[in-house]
Image: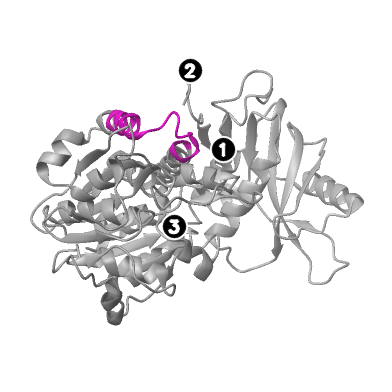
Amino acid sequence: MSPASTGFQVPTVTVSSSLPKRKVDDSVLIVAVISGSDEDAKATVVGNPFLDAEAVGEIEVALEALGAKGGSDQVTRVVAPSLPVASVVAVGLGKNRDAWPADAIRRAAGVAARSLNGVENVITTLSDIDLGAAIEGLILGAYRFNDFRSEKTAPKDNGLRAITALTADTKTRTKEAAARATDIATAVATARDFVNTPPSHLFPAEFAKRAEALGKAAGLDVEVLDDKALDKAGYGGIIGVGKGSSRPPRLVRLTHRGGKGKKSKTVALVGKGITFDTGGISIKPAANMHHMTSDMGGAAAVIATVVLAAKQKLPIDVIATVPMAENMPSATAQRPGDVLTQYGGITVEVLNTDAEGRLILADAIARACEDDPDYLIETSTLTGAQTVALGARTPGVMGSEEFRDRVAERSQQAGENAWPMPLPEELKDDLKSTVADLANVSGSRYAGMLVAGTYLREFVADGVQWAHIDIAAPAYNTGGPWGYTGKGGTGVPTRTMFAVLEDIAENG
C-alpha cells in the first residue's frame, strides 16, 4: 500500500425493525423480487413486514413498465414515492422457493451493492430473509481497492458507508449475528486488501510487519522469524526459495489462545505467502505473470482467519504458521538440481524452482505439527492443475478423508464451494529422487494438484487430521465481477476456514 493507504473501509451496520419515519434523500432501499412461473409473469416483491401495499404496488408497476422479470441477480432501480428513500433497487432471486440458500441471498446482496455507484447509505429487506448472508453480501459486493489511484482516476464517491439491515427480530442474538457477519466480511476484505496490494509494496518483511500489527491489535501472541533465525533453525525450504531475492524471507506465527480445559481442540493453520512468484530460475512465461501478486492468497486468508477467530472469541486454540518469501531469479537463487533440507530433516531435490510453494509450506507444516494440533488446515495457490481440473471458482480439498470431507461440506455451506479430491498412494512413487529423500515435482504431467498434495502429506505428523485447500484460481478473479466478487483478490478460503473453526469449537 501507499504511505497514505487505508485499505477498504468497511461500512457501518445497524439492525432495525422499521423503515425511517422521515425521508432520507441520500439512501437507497434494496428489496428482493421473484419471477413468475412463466416468461410473461410479472416480478413480485418478496413478502416482508416493512412495505405496505401501496409501496409494493409502486415497485411492481415500475418493474413491469421496465420489463424486469425478477430473474436471478437481475438488478433494476426504480422510484417508489410513498417510501422514505430516494430510490429502490430490486434484485431478483429467480423463481420462488420454500427456503432460500444463504449464498443466493449473499449473491443477490452483492450484485445489488455493486450497482450502487455514488450511494453511501442503503437499507435492505434482504436481511429479513437471511440477516448474516445479506450483510456479508452487501459489504463484499461494495468492496473496492483504490489505494494506488491518484485523484485523477479515483472514484469521486466514497462508496457504501452505512447499511441498515431490516429484520422483524431485533433481539440481542440478532445483533450478535449481525456483528458476526460484519466481522466475517471484514476478514474477507482484509485478505482481499493483502492480495490486491502490489509486490512493490508487499514484500516479505512488510507482509510480516502488517500481519504482526493485525495480530497484536487482536490480542494474539506473535512471533516473527527473520532470515537469520530461519537459517539457524533449519528452515531450508523457506531459505532456499527466498535466497534469490534481495528481500529476505520471514516466518510469522500468530496464536489465538481460546481453549478452555483439556477437551478443547487445537487447530493449526498454514498459508502460502509467496509475495511474488516469477518461477525463479525455472521462470514463468511473461504473459499474465502480473497475476502472481496473488501467490500469497493462502497466507492472506490464514492471517485474516486467525484474527477473526480472536474477534469472535472461539473457545479453541488456533495457531497460524505463515511462511513468506519472494521467488526471484538471480545469481544467488536456487537452481534446478539443488538439494535442500526441509525443516525436520527431509532432504529434497529441487527439480523445478517454480514448484516453490510446497517447499515453504513443508517447512511450515512440519513446524506447525510440533504444536501437537488436533487438526491442520493448509491453503495455498499451489498448482495450475487445480484450475485445469476444477476451474476458476472451485477450490480442491485433499487430506485425511474424514476431515477433507468435513472441510468441503463447510466450504459449500459457506458459499466457497470447495470440492474433495483424492490422494492416491501410488503418486508418492512419482516423487522419488535419485539423490535425495524426495523430489519436489514428478516426472509426469498428470495429476499435478494431487501430486502437490501428496508432497505436503509427507510433512504432516502421524495422528493429525489435515486438509490442503488448493486455491490457485479461486483466490484471484481475473474475469468479470460476479455476485459479491469483484476483480482481483477474492478472500477465498477465509469463510471456509472460519466455518470449520466454528464447527470444531462446537462439535470437536
> Is disc 3 surrounded by few (<14), some (14 to 19) or many (20+) residues within 10 Å?
many
Q: Are marks 1 and 3 in contact (CB under 8 Å)?
A: no
Please name the amino acid that badge 3 sits on: Ile
Quick check: 484 above or below 122?
below
Q: Do we see residue 47 in this rendering?
A: yes
Please tell me whether mark 3 sits on a helix, a strand or a loop.
loop
Q: Answer whether residue 157 is magenta in the image.
A: no
Residue holding disc 3: 471
Please tell me whether mark 1 sits on a helix, a strand or a loop.
loop
Please tell me whether mark 2 sits on a helix, a strand or a loop.
loop
Residue reaching furthest to the left: 262
Quick check: 9 above or below 79?
above
Residue 42 placement, left or right of 374 = right
Which comes sooner in the sequence, label 1 or label 3?
Answer: 1
Q: Do we see residue 406 in this rendering?
A: no
Residue holding disc 2: 4
Which region shows up in magenta? 193-214
Of circles 2 and 1, the one toward us is 2
Please name the amino acid that badge 2 sits on: Ala
Residue holding disc 1: 143
Please name the amino acid that badge 1 sits on: Tyr
> Is disc 2 surrounded by few (<14), some (14 to 19) or many (20+) residues within 10 Å?
few
| Residue 266 pos. (x, y %) | 17, 54
Q: The C terminus lies in which quarter of the figure?
A: bottom left
| Residue 112 pos. (x, y %) | 67, 45
